[in-house]
Image (cartoon, coloured by chain):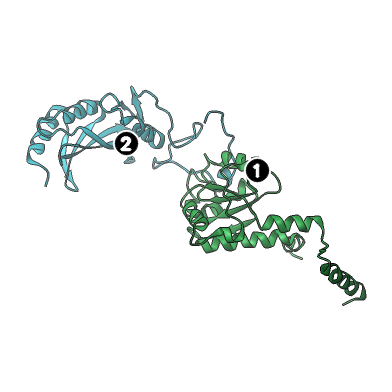
Chain colours: A cyan, B green
């Protein structure tokens, strides 16, 4: 289903960044370790003929033994789509920020940080985006335990400038 | 009917012929208040769409005199909490309620504002606006139809017009 040219380019890139290529829901998937994330994204952005130069979405995932960051790439100039999955250690969830490639990754990475506690190295303003600043824990992680009904019914004090 | 009450009624009848009506000032003020709620447009989620629809031409809330949706809490006397109250929003909601001048009332519109609704177990949602704000009327529904909001506001009208009755019901007598 995926474009043959794109398939060849992704194969070349996978060999360079030691990744695995798969296909899911008609979209090519490149799974890599977080250390090679920026190299892979830069490569995908600069593919000859089929550049995947638009960061469609960025999301965190929790697979219990490790975390993942999913980059959905597409292009404004073609039908090509590519999904890059970066594996992140659960104990030390640090990886490089994609804000150097796409300015729009700013808010997306803040959301991933907010929900999964992923630390993006080099992010200009890495703080919570949806939840309040003194929220404890990362609610979308599988091991997050929700506060009781009584605790949530207590009004928190608003901070100036929030 | 006792003689005293009969005499009062007869006097009232005579006064009415002279275009005089006797009542207590509190009753008179309440009569005015219930026919002109100025709701604070505090729409938090999808219930706000139904609230806007209620104010629109089809359901026409203005036939009851309630159409003046105010953007400022200082000019409002009724807060309609229309939608999901998140914990981040809760201090702001309370602040808006505190800024409203007395006398003031609050309506919880929709399941979310009544009890947290489908988000009752969420980490980010206050399970019921009544833990933040004293609520007078609860309107269930997801979202409630405009008719339900109108009915809720008319219930509030009954409540304000009959304060002694409400107090009795509250204490179970």
Circles 2 and 1 on the same chain: no
Residue at image position (69%, 60%) is: B159
Tell me where residue A125 sits by quadrant. Answer: top left
Residue displayed at 31% across by 41% down: A63
Label 2 crowd (10 A; few <14 / some 14-19 / many >=20): many
The label on residue A67 is 2
Q: Quadrant of residue A79?
A: top left
Say if residue B86 shows up in the picture: yes
Residue B14 percent coordinates (x, y): 86, 70
Q: Mark 2: which secondary structure? A: strand
Of badges 2 and 1, the one in the foreground is 1
Tell which of A126 and A143 is nearer to you. A126
User: Depth check: B8 or B14 in front?
Assistant: B14
Residue B47 placed where, x, y %? Answer: 49, 54
What is the crowding at mark 1: few (fewer than 14 residues within 10 Å), some, or many (at least 20)? some
User: How far, Cα to Cα, is label 2 from label 1?
Assistant: 47 Å
SS of the residue under disc 1: loop
Q: Chain of mark 2?
A: A
Which chain hosts label 1?
A: B
The residue under the point 85% across, 67% down is B15
Residue at left offset 69%, top offset 55% = B33
Q: How many marks?
A: 2
The answer to whether residue B7 is above or below residue A70 is below
Tell me the tag on residue B100: 1
Residue furthest toward the bottom?
Answer: B1
For the residues bearing labels 2 and 1, Cβ distance under 8 angstroms: no
Residue B118: percent from the left, percent from the top? 47, 54
Q: Position of residue B107 (x, y in %)?
A: 60, 54
Q: Is residue A37 left or right of residue B161?
A: left
Q: Is residue B158 left or right of residue B8?
A: left
> Left or right: A36 with respect to B32?
left
């Amino acid at each position: 289903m995926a474009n043959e040219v794109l398939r060849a380019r992704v194969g070349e890139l996978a060999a360079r960044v030691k990744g695995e290529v798969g296909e899911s829901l008609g979209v090519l998937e490149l799974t890599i370790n977080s250390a090679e994330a920026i190299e892979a994204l830069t490569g995908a952005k600069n593919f000859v003929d089929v550049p995947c130069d638009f960061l469609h979405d960025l999301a965190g995932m929790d697979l219990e033994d490790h975390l993942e960051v999913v980059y959905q790439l597409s292009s404004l100039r073609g039908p090509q789509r590519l999904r890059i999955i970066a594996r992140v250690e659960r104990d030390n969830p640090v990886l490089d920020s994609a804000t150097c490639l796409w300015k729009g990754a700013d808010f997306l990475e803040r959301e991933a940080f907010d929900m999964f506690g992923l630390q993006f190295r080099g992010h200009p303003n890495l703080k919570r985006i949806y939840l309040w600043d003194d929220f404890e824990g990362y609610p979308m992680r599988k091991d997050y335990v929700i506060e009781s009904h009584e605790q949530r019914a207590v009004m928190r004090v608003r901070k100036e400038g929030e | 009917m006792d003689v005293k009450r009969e005499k009062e009624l007869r006097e009232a009848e005579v006064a009415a012929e002279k275009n005089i009506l006797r009542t207590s000032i509190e009753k008179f003020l309440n009569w005015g208040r219930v026919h002109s709620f100025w709701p604070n447009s505090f729409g938090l989620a999808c219930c706000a769409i139904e609230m806007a629809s209620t104010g629109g031409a089809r359901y026409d809330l203005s036939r009851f005199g309630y159409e003046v949706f105010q953007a400022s809490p200082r000019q409002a006397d009724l807060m309609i909490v229309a939608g999901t109250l998140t914990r981040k929003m809760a201090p702001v909601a309370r602040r808006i309620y505190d800024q409203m001048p007395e006398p003031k009332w609050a309506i919880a519109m929709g399941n979310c504002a009544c009890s947290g609704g489908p988000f009752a177990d969420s980490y980010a949602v206050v399970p019921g606006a009544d833990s933040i704000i004293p609520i007078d009327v609860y309107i269930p529904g997801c979202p409630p139809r405009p008719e339900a909001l109108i009915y809720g506001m008319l219930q509030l009208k009954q409540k304000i017009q009959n304060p002694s009755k409400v107090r009795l019901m509250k204490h179970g007598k």
